[in-house]
Amino acid sequence: MRPPLPRIRFTVIRELLASQASGGQVLMMAAAAAMFAANSVLSEQYFHLLHLPLGPMSLLHWINDGLMAVFFLLVGCEIKREFVDGEMATWPRRILPGVAAAAGMAVPALVFLAFNRAAPGNINGWAIPTATDIAFALGVMALLGNRVPASLKLLLTAIAVIDDLGAIVVIAAVYTEGVDLAALAAAAGLCGLLALLNWRRVQLVWPYLLVGIALWVAVHASGIHATLAGVITALALPIQPSPGVPEIRDSPLLRVEHALAPIVGFAIVPIFGFANAGVDLRDLSLNIAFDPLVLGIGFGLLIGKQAGIFGSIMALVRLNIVDMPANASPRQLWGMTLLCGIGFTMSLFIAALAYGTGSDQEATAKLGIIAGSLASALIGLLVLRR
């Protein structure tokens, strides 16, 4: 008789909430360390290290294109698991986070465009304030302990998952230039091979990862951002739905997700934050604070995110389409939507795609991201503490 499959004691999402919250706190320290290094006597060594050539790319490019592919592999696993066997497995469950995430992307983009309508050179960065950094936001929530209802933590996670899905679509559709058709054809063939592995229900993980590595090379050569190979690989990993009972950990997708979660949360994302958050402020004037790029991103994150998410959720509640999250007051909901304005990781990533790594515009965009994310975190923390 076949032995029973091992089952997860708690749902995956609740386990990941704890690990991502801790990882978010590590990310905060990495970002602070980057700002210190960029504005101290270590500044020259910090920037020299990032541009150190390692084979065909610099260290910074290996971090942004290579390590972040692993980050997107984890994101892809989370998205698929949530939609197949998680908190958003049915359409009624998708309404609230889906509408909130859509509004939380649209309104910040409109705020950004309003500030930059007279600066056409900045328009390409409209997607920067649309992102939510789930690890950073949960890290701030973790500082509040039991003051935040579990329903809001789950809602924040669901909104961020759909937000990540939207960011992936934007990256693929907007920030791709000069496609190499031969490399793209090779990537398409490898995608077909992943689909075949999934169709045959191959339960070994290594064939998917091996094809995923080859796909990363092909996608990188095609001109499309290589990190999308991580998402495609994740979507091919099989998962066995288990409605009403704890998830079966034996499925390839959950094995990969649980193996990657601590690596991504405590190593890859902090490394990315350290490599990308450093901005040299020593030679900047106060006028930079009034740059439309800084204002558009900063207010997009701080004002646009909360207006879009809080406004859409309250509208759905008032129209009796959905219920207010359990045990949560409107004030607590408002505090949660403020934390959704912490863009950081994905915002930094999109800024590099929009303006080019190392450009003056990217440096200016980083100021807006840091300012908007920090203001959202502090105000959200104050609101939820009360």
Image: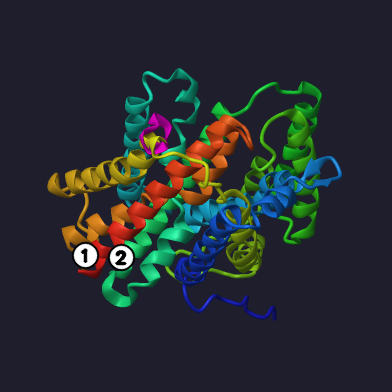
Q: Is 361 rendered above or below residue 23?
A: above
- Give the residue drawn at x 54%, y 52%: 80
- 56 left or right of 291 in image: right
- Give the residue drawn at x 53%, y 56%: 81
- 369 left or right of 208 in image: left
Please tell me which residue lies in front, 34 or 107.
Answer: 34
Q: Quadrant of the N terminus?
A: bottom right
- 379 left or right of 178 in image: left
Report whether residue 200 is seen. no
The 10 Å Cα crowd at callout 2, few under 14, some 14 to 19, many 20 or more, is: some
Q: Are marks 1 and 2 in contact (CB under 8 Å)?
A: yes
Which residue position holds label 1? Answer: 328
Q: Quadrant of the C terminus?
A: bottom left
- 254 left or right of 321 in image: right
Chosen colour scheme: rainbow
Which residue position holds label 2? Answer: 151
Q: Amino acid at mark 2?
A: Ser
The 10 Å Cα crowd at callout 1, few under 14, some 14 to 19, many 20 or more, is: some
**Main secondary structure type of the part rendered in magenta:** helix
Q: Is 56 rendered above or below residue 23?
A: above
Find numbered disc 1 in the image and state the secondary structure of the residue it sits on. loop
Spatial distance from mark 1 to mark 2, Cα to Cα? 7 Å
Magenta highlight range: 288-294
Report whether residue 36 is seen. yes
**In the rendered image, which quarter is residue 36 located in?**
bottom right
